[in-house]
Amino acid sequence: MNAYIDGMRRYFDFKGRANRTEFWMFTLIVFIGGILALILDVALGNGQNGPLFVTALWIIPHYIPGLAVTIRRLHDINRTGWWVLIGIIPLGALVLLVFYCQPSTPGVNRFGMGHVGNGAQSPVQARQQANAG
């Protein structure tokens, strides 16, 4: 739940890094919320001849934070956020899925300091790891 709250708190923050746990927990909560919103829409009879109001009310506010956490996840594996555009082409989503599942770059990369637990005990050690590798 903290990953979701952090993702919403960093609504327009496209800088920095998001580890796998943060990305996947945010994605899972948004996905489950979307399913529940869709079920509620069907129960209310929405979607038969009109729009899915509840689903739209859930998905629209999560678009920008979802994009932000996705770009921060790409930063965490030392890739630019522009890679998200590969999802436009056929099979591009599979490439992104592979990227999202890769382990974090340990220590410091060009997008900043990684999260604790990815091999960096301190900023000094992280810089030493980045310079050594």
Image (cartoon, grey):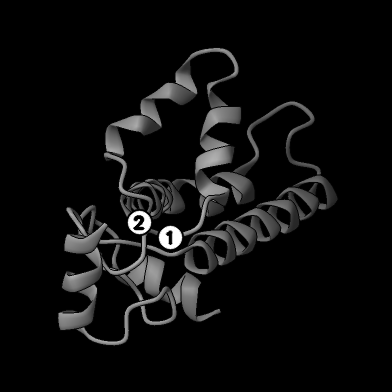
Q: Position of residue 117 (x, y in %)?
A: 44, 80
Q: Quadrant of the N terminus?
A: bottom right
In the image: residue 55, left or right of residue 40: left
Q: Residues within 10 Å of mark 1 (few under 14, many from 20)?
A: many
Q: Are marks 2 and 1 in contact (CB under 8 Å)?
A: yes
Amino acid type, residue under disc 2 in the picture: Asp
Q: Position of residue 68 (x, y in %)?
A: 33, 51
Q: Name the residue under label 2.
A: 76
Amino acid type, residue under disc 1 in the picture: Ser
The residue that appears at 61% across and 64% down in the rendered structure is 29
Q: Which of marks 2 and 1 is nearer the N terminus?
A: 2
Q: Where is residue 17 in the image (x, y as percent from the top left)?
A: 31, 61
In the image: residue 9, left or right of residue 23: left
Q: Residue furthest right?
A: 43
Distance (Cα) linking label 2 and label 1: 5 Å
Q: Which residue lies furthest to the top in this view?
A: 90
The answer to whether 63 is drawn above or below residue 129 in the figure is above
Q: Mark 1 points at which residue?
A: 104
In the image: residue 28, left or right of residue 26: right
- Secondary structure under badge 2? helix
- Secondary structure under badge 1? loop
Closest to the observer: 61 or 14? 14
Q: In which quarter of the image is the C terminus?
A: bottom left
Q: Where is residue 40 in the image (x, y as percent from the top left)?
A: 76, 55
Closest to the observer: 40 or 75? 75
Q: Residue furthest front?
A: 132
The residue that appears at 65% across and 39% down in the rendered structure is 52
The answer to whether 59 is drawn above or below residue 17 in the figure is above
Give the total of numbered labels.
2
The residue that appears at 43% across and 23% down in the rendered structure is 86
